[in-house]
C-alpha cells in the first residue's frame, strides 16, 4: 500500500515537472514569435501587457542586458530591471495617447525608493513636452511607440541571418 502511494506521488512529480517544462518552452516560443512578427503599434495594443513585458525582456536580453523582472516599479504590471541599474516601466496606452507628467513623477518616486538612478518609460503613444523635459532632468529615457518599433526591428535585424546564394561549383 505504501509502495503504491509512493509510486503515485513520484508519477505526479514527474508529470508536473514535464508539463511545466513543456509550458515554459511553449511560452518562450510564443514570445520569440511575437518579437519576430510585430510590425505595428496596433499589434502591440492588442497584446496583453505581460506579453509585451516578456517581449521587452527578450528584446533587452538580445541587446546584451541582464534582465530581471521586478515588482518595485510598474503601475499596472511589474517592470524590468536592466543590469541592476535601470528601471523599465511599460505604459500600454493608445498610440494617440500622450503620457502625462504625473506618470513620470510616480516612476521617479519608485526609482528613489529602490535607489535606482536611471529609468526608461515605454509607451505605445507619445509623451507631452513637459513630461519629456521632466524625464530628461531625472535621467529617464522616454521611448514612444515608434521608437519601440524601431528597437524591435533593430533586434530583429541582428538576429535574422543573411541569406546569400552561393554558386554551385561543378566538377570538371
Image: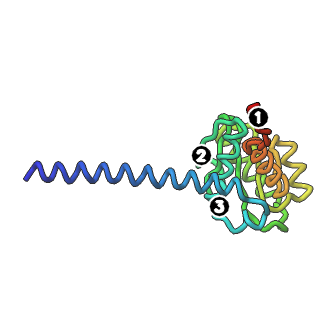
| Residue appearing at x 20%, y 54% in the figure | 8
Foreground pick, 168 / 124: 168
Residue named by callout 3: 49
Foreground pick, 81 / 100: 81
Residue sitting at the far top? 172
Instruction: Report helix, strand or loop for mark 2.
Output: strand
Question: Local crowd at mark 3 within 10 Å, few (<14), some, or many (≥20)?
Answer: some
Foreground pick, 119 / 28: 28
The image quarter containing residue 77 is bottom right
State how the image is colored: rainbow
Instruction: Report helix, strand or loop for mark 3.
Output: helix
> Where in the figure is residue 132, as x and y percent of width and height?
88, 51
* Label located before the other in sequence (2 or 1): 2
Foreground pick, 104 / 22: 22
The answer to the question of whether label 3 and label 1 lie on touching residues, with beta carbons closer than 8 A, is: no
* Label located before the other in sequence (3 or 1): 3
Residue named by callout 2: 69
The image quarter containing residue 82 is top right
* Label located before the other in sequence (3 or 2): 3
Mark number, residue 115: none
Residue named by callout 1: 169
The image quarter containing residue 67 is top right
Q: CA distance from mark 2 to mark 1?
A: 51 Å
Question: Local crowd at mark 2 within 10 Å, few (<14), some, or many (≥20)?
Answer: some
Residue 8 vs 161, above or below: the answer is: below
Of the two numbered discs 3 and 1 in the rendering, the one whose residue sits closer to the viewer: 1
> Where in the figure is residue 79, as x and y percent of width and height?
65, 50
> Where in the figure is residue 118, as x and y percent of width and height?
76, 39
Q: CA distance from mark 3 to mark 1?
A: 52 Å
The answer to the question of whether label 2 and label 1 lie on touching residues, with beta carbons closer than 8 A, is: no
Amino acid at each position: 500500500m505504501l509502495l503504491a502511494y509512493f509510486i503515485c506521488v513520484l508519477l505526479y512529480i514527474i508529470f508536473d515537472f514535464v508539463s511545466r517544462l513543456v509550458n515554459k518552452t511553449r511560452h518562450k516560443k510564443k514570445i520569440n514569435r511575437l518579437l519576430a512578427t510585430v510590425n505595428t503599434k496596433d499589434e502591440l495594443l492588442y497584446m496583453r501587457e505581460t506579453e509585451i513585458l516578456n517581449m521587452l525582456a527578450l528584446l533587452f536580453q538580445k541587446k546584451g542586458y541582464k534582465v530581471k523582472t521586478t515588482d518595485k516599479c510598474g503601475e499596472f504590471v511589474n517592470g524590468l530591471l536592466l543590469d541592476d541599474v535601470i528601471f523599465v516601466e511599460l505604459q500600454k496606452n493608445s498610440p494617440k495617447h500622450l503620457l502625462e507628467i504625473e506618470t513620470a513623477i510616480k516612476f521617479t518616486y519608485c526609482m528613489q525608493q529602490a535607489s535606482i538612478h536611471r529609468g526608461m518609460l515605454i509607451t505605445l503613444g507619445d509623451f507631452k513636452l513637459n513630461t519629456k523635459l521632466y524625464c530628461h532632468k531625472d535621467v529617464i529615457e522616454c521611448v514612444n511607440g515608434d521608437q519601440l518599433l524601431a528597437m524591435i526591428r533593430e533586434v530583429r535585424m541582428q538576429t535574422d541571418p543573411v541569406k546569400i546564394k552561393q554558386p554551385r561549383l561543378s566538377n570538371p
